[in-house]
Image (cartoon, rainbow, N blue to C red):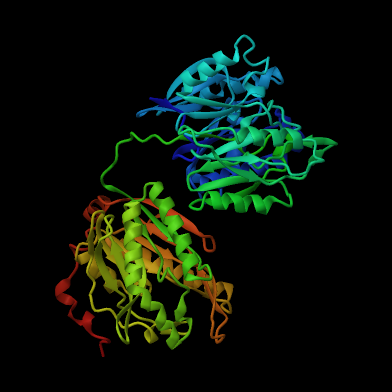
Amino acid sequence: MTRLPAQWEDQEFVQLVFPHENTDWNEYLDNAIDTFINIAKTIAKYQKCLIVAKNLSKTKSYFEDFEYKNNLTFIRIDSNDTWSRDFGGITVQNEDIFTVLDFKFNAWGNKFDSKLDNQITSKLKLKGMLKEYSHQSIQLVLEGGSIDSDGNGTILTTSKCLLEKNRNPTLSKTTIEKKLKDTLGASKILWLNHGELIGDDTDAHIDTLARFVCKNTIVYQSCDDENDEQYDELKKMKEELQTFTNSSNEPYNLIALPTIQAKYEDDERLPATYANFLIINGAVLVPTYNDINDNKALDIFKKIFPSRYVIGIDCTTLIKQHGSLHCVTMQYPRITKEEENNSILKTALIQQKYYSSKEETIKQTVFKIQEASKNGALLVVLQELHQTHYFCQNENVDTFDLANSWEEDLKFWSNIALENSIVLVTSLFEKRAAGLYHNTAVVFEKDGSIAGKYRKMHIPDDPGFYEKFYFTPGDLGFEPIQTSVGKLGVLICWDQWYPEAARLMCLKGADILIYPTAIGWFEDDSKEEQQKQLDAWITVQRGHSIANNIPIITANRTGFEKDDSNILKGTNFWGNSFVLGAQGEFLAHASNQKEQILYAPIDLKNTENVRRWWPFLRDRRIECYNDITKRYID
């Protein structure tokens, strides 16, 4: 059965068309380009983004040093304008077949020239950008911004737009509704007869007014100022929405988006709306307008989408051309029929700050785990002592109470692994017995069972890292943990500096080395010294990878944590989490201050290939290494 997927479903990529000198953006082209760069970079942090550009080389130059440029694809196609939502392909799904429907676009009823824009989708198909999708031309004028789908057969639209005389002048409402049902697989069309923003060129596109955020909830742009010229229309729209029912014949949960103060350009009112948001994999992008209610709108979306990042995008330039964020983007659903390479392990590590309480920190971690799972990760790695602050900056006997929840912690993270069907590497404060505590990595299988544990063997005792006060050295040895995704050589932080630990894990058959970590700078360290420390930390682990021909996952925390004893100022944890391939090459590398879900595919078969080229294990002179077990050779 054909259906139009909802925007919150998994996406393959988002399409953008960049402004150029021949578009209406020319008057403020630099500001427009900055806005599009911001949108593209934000999207690319979470998923792929296709950028259509008239000036290809110039557009590419904007992203030369961008960290996630591998998620960007560029194609040269000329355009009249930049409104991808309305001339972009609308993708429907019928079982495993995804078809891009190429509707006619006539610039909102022949208001502007649209010849080039009307050809973009077909040119993308010809140039191989849509090769995984079927393509079908539809002889009906329809803009993507004029419809919204719940993914379950219900379409939300407006009569002012779809029945406007210059779009499909020979078709009645009944005929148009039938065509929508036939092409989009809809079972129910909800028509709004009221609601329109002043300054809107589109004749009341639904994506400026009201949107689905799940199959039972609609958000809508509200107006609570009775003196506002938009008040009556938006009030009547709200009353109409209250009469709508979902596919189960139940009324919708309605959420009002806050009023936006009137915005003007040369005495012309501009159509600012929070309803023009964009949902992507792992995040929701919300248009902002330097308005007093911007933060209130962001807070509403955070409550609606607790497992996604909510990011404000300054759209003050976009509304000068009578559109906003959703209007310049078009998502394409993820293709699910691709063949899986069984040797490729989809991994994710979570680099995160401490959120001032254990409860809030865990909440944020769980959101990120859920997102990683949705994006296909089978193995998720958390940082060292990820539930709490790094309490080893000082010595305090009361801190041992944090380990009293050890048994409850095991149950909790077991459920998280089970609910998300992932192998999960955690780092917990273990209370083994009265007065006996460990820094313990617990690996949970995707069915929630405990696959194995590793107790930290090398325990530091340095200013700001007083771990010997809290942790007994591990006694489980260097034993890889067998899981459904491979044998995991789990070590912890200070173990990173010891090649013996890495080598022993590899000699026992580990497929991957994993280091949950908590390491950072002191504020008093010079910039030069900080860089030396960071370089040394990365280099020693690349050395382990190269010497053992093995991938490595290192998850570090980020953010500043104050020393509660006030003996030291605190530690600025330097992030820089990374994933290495079997030759020490970076597969993914996080920033030093930002929280991130860092994704990386690891080819488990590559270790075999590399060890054939560089047979370090073969050439070891094991008969000559007896003295390695001595503390020092005097």
Q: Quadrant of residue 403?
A: bottom left
Closer to the camera, 380 or 419?
A: 419
Residue depicted at x 45% and y 56%: 368
Residue depicted at x 32% and y 72%: 407
The image shows residue 442, relative to residue 380, as above or below, that is: below
Q: Quadrant of residue 523?
A: bottom right
| Residue 310 makes an appearance in the image | no
The image shows residue 448, relative to residue 328, as above or below, that is: below
Residue 552, horizontal then vertical, whole percent: 34, 61
Residue 311, horizontal then vertical, whole percent: 59, 50
The image shows residue 493, relative to residue 165, as above or below, that is: below
Residue 175, horizontal then vertical, whole percent: 55, 13
Residue depicted at x 26% and y 55%: 447
| Residue 539 makes an appearance in the image | yes
Q: Is residue 507 left or right of residue 324?
A: left
Q: Quadrant of residue 107?
A: top right
Residue 313, horizontal then vertical, whole percent: 64, 47
Residue depicted at x 33% and y 57%: 417
